[in-house]
Image: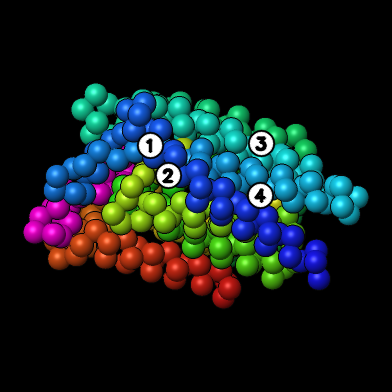
Amino acid sequence: MVQYLIPVICAILSFLVVLYLTPWTIRYLRRIDLVVKDQNKKDKPLISQSGGLTVLAGVFVGLNLYIFIRTFVYNDTSYLLYLFAGMSSLIMITLVGFIDDLLVQKSKEQTAGLKQWQKPLLTLAAALPLMVINAGDTIMALPFFGEINFGLLYPLLLIPIGIVGAANMVNMLAGLNGLETGLGIIITGTLGLYSYFYSNTMGSLFALVVFSSLLAFYIYNKYPAKIFPGDSLTYLIGGSIAIIAILGNIEKAAIIISIPFFIEFILKARSKFRAKSYGYEKNGKICSYHENKIYSITHFFTRTGKFTERQVVYFTYLIQIFFALLIWLI
């Protein structure tokens, strides 16, 4: 019975670490002038940018506590190598996002960011820890195709594609208070339950620790946001989805739950990736910069000019929840 409580204890510690560190991080980021304007507010206040390192600290502490207990209390080191590999990948992914966050325009309108070709190249390195230990199962159950054995193609090709793709996809559907963090909470919480249902300890543990860390960060990121996630956190969330899928052997579920991001990619491609998901405030409502054109999932709501920022975020949550429920049916 006690062993089943260990992941919960680790998750609680992760939550408390992020809850404690985030206010300090907000003040520190302001001190070093790492702030950007909140584009969705009429007065465009300056908000601290880049919450990924704080969430990473919570995940790091929670996972290491679990590893410590399994090693010294239960003398069990099985599958700990996979947790270390997953943690190493997550650290590398988050640091790439943090570097991206450091490049802020002088106007504070938004981050200048890395070049488009630099992002996948740098996040590709984060796949190496999982590749070299041959993490995951080469037999994958895919929607419409069934089970396929990819053999060596799995660690050498599919893992890097999964890490790079997932790390960059969350960043596309972003820009509203609490949006990215809330989507991350829904996804990691669902994938954690899915892994637990199929008796996969590694996937469920990793998801639980990330989920609890995001939950604490959401307290400060929800509307009205006191801190923005930045690319450091969107990369962390995307990377976590891929790592949970690999460690938990639940690639099919991860693909289905990520469908909103595939839709977002197609919509953004129509604008040659120039469109923004956020809008501008008018009479307390959020309006789209692109009028009636739809280049993002959020534009379905912002183009009407009838909804507040909070409502647009909640509607987007509902879309994500639909696909989260779908993984149990397909």
- Disc 3/disc 1 C-alpha distance (Å): 28 Å
Say whether disc 2 or disc 3 marks the residue closer to the N-terminus: 2
> Which of label 4 and label 3 is nearer to you?
4
Residue underneath mark 3: 88
Question: Which residue appears at 29% of the width and 40% of the height?
Answer: 47
Q: Along the polypeptide, which appears first: circle 3 or circle 1?
A: 1
The answer to which image quadrant residue 38 occupies is: top left
Please state which of residues 100 and 254 is positioned toward the viewer in this rendering: 100
Q: Image point 62% across, 62% down: which residue?
A: 192
Q: Which of labels 3 and 1 is toward the front?
A: 1
Between label 2 and label 3, give the one nearer the viewer: 2
Which residue position is annotated with label 2?
Answer: 23
Element under label 3? Answer: helix
How far apart are the two marked residues, 2 and 3, measured between alpha carbons? 26 Å
Closer mark to the observer between disc 1 and disc 4: 1
What residue is pinned by disc 1? Answer: 27
- Relative to 203, is 85 above or below? above
- C-alpha gap between disc 1 and disc 2: 6 Å
Is residue 310 toward the left or the right of residue 124 in the image?
A: left
